[in-house]
Amino acid sequence: MYKVLRKERLTPKAVLLEVQDERAKLVKPGQYALVQANEESEPIPLSFLDVKESSYTFLVEVGGRATLEIAELVEEKIQFIEAPCGSPFPVKNYGKVLLISKNWGVAPLINIGRALKEESNEIYFVHVAEDEERVFLTKEASEISEEFLLFTEDGSLGEEGNSEWALGYFIENFGKPDLIVSAGSNLDSQMINRFAEERNIPHIAMVNAHILDANGLCLACRVLVEGQEKLACIDGPWFDASKVDWDYAIQKEAFYKEEEEKALKTFLRELQRLKARGR
Amino acid sequence: MAKKIRYLDRNKEPTLPPEERVKTFREFELGYSVNLALDEAQRCLFCKDAEQRCIKGCPVHVDIPGFIKKITEGDLVGAYKVITQSDIFPSICGRVCPQERQCEGSCILYYDTVRNRKNKGLPVAIGALEKFVGDFIRISGIEIEEEKEPPTGFRVAVIGAGPAGLSCAHELAKKGHEVHVYEALPKPGGVMYYGIPNARLDKSIIEWEVKRLEKLGIKFFYGYLIGKNITLQELREKYDAVFIAVGAGRGKLGLPGDHLKGVYSAIDFLMRVNLYKANEFPKKGVPVELGKRTVIIGGGFTAVDCAITANRLGVETHVVYRRTRETSSARQEEWDHLMEEGVKIHWLTQPVEVIGNEKGEVVGLKCIKMELGEPDESGRPRPVPVPNSEHIIECDSVIFAIGQRANPIAYEGSGIKTTKWGTIEVNERYETNLEGVFAGGDVINGGDRVVVALAHGKEAAKYIHEYLMSNKEVRK
Ligand SMILES: Cc1cc2nc3c(=O)[nH]c(=O)nc-3n(C[C@H](O)[C@H](O)[C@H](O)COP(=O)(O)OP(=O)(O)OC[C@H]3O[C@@H](n4cnc5c(N)ncnc54)[C@H](O)[C@@H]3O)c2cc1C
Ligand SMILES: Cc1cc2nc3c(=O)[nH]c(=O)nc-3n(C[C@H](O)[C@H](O)[C@H](O)COP(=O)(O)OP(=O)(O)OC[C@H]3O[C@@H](n4cnc5c(N)ncnc54)[C@H](O)[C@@H]3O)c2cc1C
Ligand code: SF4
Ligand code: SF4
Ligand code: FES
Ligand SMILES: [Mg+2]
């Protein structure tokens, strides 16, 4: 059991969650935690956003069942957290670095952006959100960057545009970066990668894969990197985007689509019952 | 008067009928009643040379006639004490040991290990008796005091809470050392928890045993993946000795088509059900989806456990194995159970490719038939393909239960010496090439049995104790 120190709603689609944990000291930039809200819940990966001496903060964007459970049911305690997991981001001096986040991807990118800034990189930040409810942490993102640009796909806030468009706009106005880092969506990272490859810009991306144990045991999270099986949970989540088989990663993301819908429906009914009973 | 030898009247453990047990994840072997246990204990001849027979067949050398004698005397606490001198988990070993190839296989009623010939009878049900004794103590609530030596001031880190780690921790704690166990998963027990289904080993037993260890003062830290959050080197600096017991639990795939939707490693599949109760999806959050029919590839413990589990999810279950039943490393009894439950087993069948449709979903498993040819290096007849025997078993999912691999995260890059299979190299004292670092269980042998892991943990503890007491000053 882990103690929740703070829970804050950012938008109808997202909460910030600060959790007390001595293991905070061990966290390196770009790592994540495997979080299980309660005994019944699916464990899911969440990236570290802020890390302090003995606590850390997650940004949780509500998508399906597990994230909704965290947003709705978690108040004081979290059942289980494995942390920190995954290989850290390769932090060093690259020069001019462009961070492009999609939705929740802003959290891991702020985390590594801070570390990159300490290595005297020049940070530029582009956040692409599906809609205004997925615009979060803009202040934190702009604090570390020379320039922060906001796009929404439906034009509800900031400029209208998707990742590819945003990237084109960036290069036109601010020139070519020495490194692109993307997180938050495989589809977007694939799009960005095509663009980056054409222009010979190095690109590191966080690959999303279904993570079950985060320990390298089950192989559920396997991805193909240069034709080799790699495990997103331990070898990743950061990979050289030009070497990732994105079609495979995207196809695998949908493996549990039907079950995920069913799980959400069941939980929504349960949630209504809880609310009717005034929990 | 000479005792009449009861060769054949072995007491069968009461078992749920097949049509009942496939509906539930409850244990289906229900355990001896007191009467059955007493009667079965009477069958033992208390052989004077048991050291050469049943005791030798047991990897941890439980004093078998010794504990059975206690049962006949009605002294179950005494029986428990005799067993736990060698095997700390009687309830567990009684359930999961392949007794027919260990203790029971060497019982004189069945096989005369001294004269090397088959006898006419059925062995004493040593496993069932051991389970009875362990269960009795657990259920009766009788507290067995464990002797613990005064604190030494030494601190030992154990990595992994599987059988090897647990038994090592237990032994070291009794010697007065402070023991911290680091486990990546949310639950203790290793494969015993996330691999072996409830139907064979109820999880509450593992939890009870771990409480016992906690009472001895052992501390457990869950959600620590050594190598990713704390390195081995850091543990060596913080503790006086380290025992690596991380098993060899990484799943294995390996046929064309193993990227398709519906393909699982055994560990992926079993972990979903055993650790995260996917059988109760969607009430619980973790899904598992096998479709209407599944095919399990493999012929060992893992394949059996996958079959037990899949069948209880209401899925038509097939097992394909390239060799024969006789060469399988699982308990023979388990195959009988599976067949009674309606699982279809295809012996001498080699899978060659997982077949998918245009949506990337599994639709079948292409196989060829095998026949027995010349013996190979191990002396077993080598299966060879039958020409033109290719066929497809239609299915919606495929589970690879073809053994596990080393999972080197804990020790990768630490400078530890490993074998070509990625397992850790140790000497006869379970020492690795790194000072103060020991290893045992599946991580040194690549995959064996629970009882062997228990034995490693216990023996290694002896050497760790020696190492601490002879070489080291207590750190302040
Ligand atoms: C390394 C990593 C770091 C992440 N960091 C964050 C973060 O900081 N904040 C945040 O809001 N989200 C983060 N995510 C995404 C988050 O894990 C998923 O949104 C979440 O698992 C969805 O679960 P759900 O039950 O709410 O939704 P579902 O409806 O069950 O799933 C929605 C989609 O999320 C993905 N997903 C589902 N289950 C898992 C799983 N067990 N592991 C990984 N992906 C899954 C699938 O693509 C799925 O289609 C991260 C993902 C990864 C891989
Ligand atoms: C499905 C299956 C069924 C089996 N059935 C039987 C049976 O019926 N009878 C029998 O005798 N044997 C059986 N076996 C074999 C037996 O389970 C193993 O030989 C035994 O569990 C090995 O014990 P261990 O302690 O070495 O490792 P494990 O049981 O593998 O335990 C290792 C533990 O270490 C943890 N770990 C791994 N890496 C790290 C890390 N870096 N940091 C922290 N923790 C870590 C793991 O999560 C795990 O909990 C079976 C095996 C499988 C796979
Ligand atoms: S530990 Fe296993 S092999 Fe040894 S006596 Fe008990 S059941 Fe038999
Ligand atoms: S060999 Fe069989 S009969 Fe003899 S002591 Fe062992 S269990 Fe009893
Ligand atoms: S999540 Fe199980 S191996 Fe990566
Ligand atoms: Mg989910």
Image (cartoon, rainbow, N blue to C red):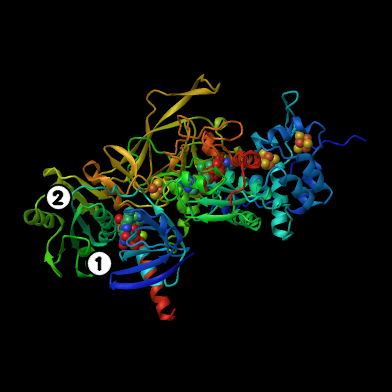
- The residue that mark 1 highlights is A137
Q: Which mark is residue A177?
A: 2
Q: Residue furthest right?
A: B1
Is label 1 in a helix, a strand or a loop? loop
Residue in the image at 61% along x and 31% along y: B428
Judge the density around disc 1: few (<14), some (14-19), many (≥20) Cα neighbours within 10 Å: some
Q: Is residue B108 visible?
A: no
Which chain letter matches label 2? Answer: A
Judge the density around disc 2: few (<14), some (14-19), many (≥20) Cα neighbours within 10 Å: many
Q: Is residue A64 left or right of residue B464?
A: left
Q: Is residue A15 visible?
A: yes
> Which amino acid type corresponds to the residue marked 2 in the rendered image?
Pro
Q: Nearer the viewer, residue B475 or A148?
A: B475
Asked if residue B98 is positioned above or below residue B282 in the image, the reply reads above
Is label 2 in a helix, a strand or a loop? loop
- Closer to the observer: label 1 or label 2? 2
Q: Nearer the viewer, residue B410 or B320?
A: B410
Give the mark nearest the N terminus, 1 or 2. Answer: 1
Marks 1 and 2, how far apart at CA: 23 Å
Q: Nearer the viewer, residue B389 or B408?
A: B408
Which chain letter matches label 1? Answer: A
Number of marks = 2
- Residue A27 at what x, y percent from top left? 38, 55
Asked if residue B130 is positioned above or below residue B369 in the image, the reply reads below
- Residue B169 at what x, y percent from top left? 61, 48
